[in-house]
């Protein structure tokens, strides 16, 4: 799957949202505006009228194109961005762009080091379309329910029947806000590539929720609550030119943001993993894929409560700056990794009969302000 994509969003004017055929007309114009680049998928901005249930089909209030750009240069990406931002249509209110970055599961060291403390992410799943069911009735039921159940279940902060917010309510659910729902339609078919405007005539191939996240308060709380338990302040009268501070997180804190409380470290994870592996065998019968899944899931759930040391020579540690150093060098990358891996485990295990393993992604969204394309291309 692509690592870097342009996320191209075109929102409809209010009076055209409920007008039949708006999506097709706009998509044809968007196709014509971007003729030289393959569109990986077209997504519907899906909204419901005020007072209606989330599970309702709703209306398409805009279109989102996913444009892979790993294969082109930074200058070519910038040229394409400038072109997409210039798009206009009588039915459309705005044309905006972002860059998305897709990370492997689990989060690797490089990504962990630069993962931001606040921003926007997208959780994207692809449907199984009844894969693994043995009779026609079950297959039809799975296809009929996968969109509705994904709209309810993919949102990690929604509460209620069929939702997933209960898994995260006590901890990382507090770190996410403003979910936006999208239906994913693929441009890839058995016959080859089809344009997004044609893909809109078919059924959904998956779902996406985009959310804001902010880890700052959680990091601050972990630093404060761990003082005297995981680490002790330096002696301000100590004249040692290379002070050392040990942070030992082996003892769990009575803090909702201690990763020990997160979903992927729950006592029931082994049963959850066993169910996923069984579903995979039912779906594909491929023992190699099953073993790869087990390896990834075990890595995601591995507890990493490692004792760390900060020093004056390596980190610039001095008395009075302990909290800042611990926040920057220990709590921030640790919480970012656990936050990401918890959501990755959720995507891989929440609805394995509906969400195709190996196709789920977590995208970090980069705004165009202060974007450094050359650096992103190098990662």
Image (tube, grey):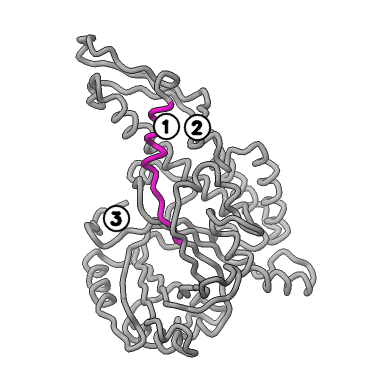
Q: Position of residue 135 (x, y in %)?
A: 79, 71
Rendered view: 128 above or below 26: above
The kind of secondary structure element at disc 3 is helix
- Mark 1 or mark 3, earlier in chain: 1
Main secondary structure found in the magenta portion: helix
Q: Position of residue 44 (x, y in %)?
A: 47, 75
The range drawn in magenta is 210-225
CA distance separating discs 1 and 3 = 30 Å
Residue 347 magenta: no
Pointer 3: what residue? 376
Q: Position of residue 27 (x, y in %)?
A: 41, 84
Residue 214 magenta: yes
**How many discs appear?**
3
Residue positioned 59% across, 41% down in the render: 298
CA distance separating discs 1 and 2 = 7 Å
Give the residue at the far front of this rendering.
Answer: 51
Residue positioned 49% across, 69% down in the render: 182
Pointer 2: what residue? 255
The kind of secondary structure element at disc 1 is helix
Graded by Cα atoms within 10 Å as few (under 14), some (14 to 19) or many (20 or more), the crowding at tag 3 reads some
Cβ–Cβ under 8 Å for marks 1 and 2: yes
Residue positioned 26% across, 27% down in the render: 315
Pointer 1: what residue? 222
Graded by Cα atoms within 10 Å as few (under 14), some (14 to 19) or many (20 or more), the crowding at tag 2 reads some
Residue 164 quadrant = bottom right
**Which is in the foreground here, disc 1 or disc 3?**
1
Query: With 92 as the anchor, is 250 left or right in this view?
Result: right
In this view, the residue in front, 62 or 283, is: 62
- Mark 1 or mark 2, earlier in chain: 1
In this view, the residue in front, 369 or 219, is: 219
Rendered view: 21 above or below 234: below
- Mark 3 or mark 2, earlier in chain: 2
């Amino acid at each position: 799957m692509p690592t870097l994509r342009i996320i191209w969003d075109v929102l409809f004017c209010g009076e055209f949202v409920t007008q039949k055929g708006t999506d097709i007309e706009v998509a044809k114009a968007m196709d014509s505006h971007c003729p030289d680049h393959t569109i990986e998928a077209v997504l519907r901005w899906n909204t419901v009228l005020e007072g209606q249930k989330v599970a309702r089909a709703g209306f398409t209030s805009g279109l989102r194109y996913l444009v892979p750009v790993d294969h082109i240069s930074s200058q070519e990406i910038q040229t394409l961005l400038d072109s997409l931002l210039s798009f206009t249509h009588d039915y459309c209110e705005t044309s905006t762009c972002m860059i998305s970055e897709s990370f492997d599961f689990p989060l690797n060291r490089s990504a962990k080091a630069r993962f931001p403390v606040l921003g926007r992410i997208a959780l994207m799943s692809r449907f199984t379309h009844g894969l693994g069911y043995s009779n026609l009735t079950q297959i039809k039921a799975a296809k009929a329910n996968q969109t509705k159940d994904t709209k309810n279940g993919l949102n990690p902060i929604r509460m209620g029947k069929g939702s997933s917010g209960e898994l995260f309510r006590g901890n990382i659910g507090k770190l996410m806000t403003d979910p936006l729902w999208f239906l994913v339609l693929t441009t890839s078919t058995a016959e080859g590539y089809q344009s997004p405007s044609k893909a809109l005539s078919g059924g959904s191939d998956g779902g996406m929720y985009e959310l804001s996240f902010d880890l700052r308060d959680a990091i601050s709380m972990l630093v404060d609550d761990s003082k005297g338990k995981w680490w002790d302040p330096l002696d301000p009268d100590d004249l040692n030119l290379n002070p050392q501070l040990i942070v030992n997180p082996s003892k769990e804190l009575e803090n909702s943001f201690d990763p020990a409380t997160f979903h992927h470290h729950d006592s029931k994870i082994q049963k959850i993993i066993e169910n996923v592996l069984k579903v995979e065998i039912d779906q594909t019968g491929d023992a190699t894929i099953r073993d790869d899944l087990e390896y990834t899931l075990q890595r995601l759930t591995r507890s990493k409560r490692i004792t760390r040391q900060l020093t004056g020579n390596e980190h610039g540690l001095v008395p009075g700056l302990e909290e800042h150093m611990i926040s920057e060098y220990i709590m921030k990358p640790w919480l970012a990794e656990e936050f990401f891996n918890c959501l990755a485990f959720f995507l891989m295990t929440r609805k394995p009969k509906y969400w195709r393993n190996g196709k789920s992604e977590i995208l970090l969204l980069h705004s165009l302000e202060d974007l450094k394309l050359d650096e992103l291309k190098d990662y």
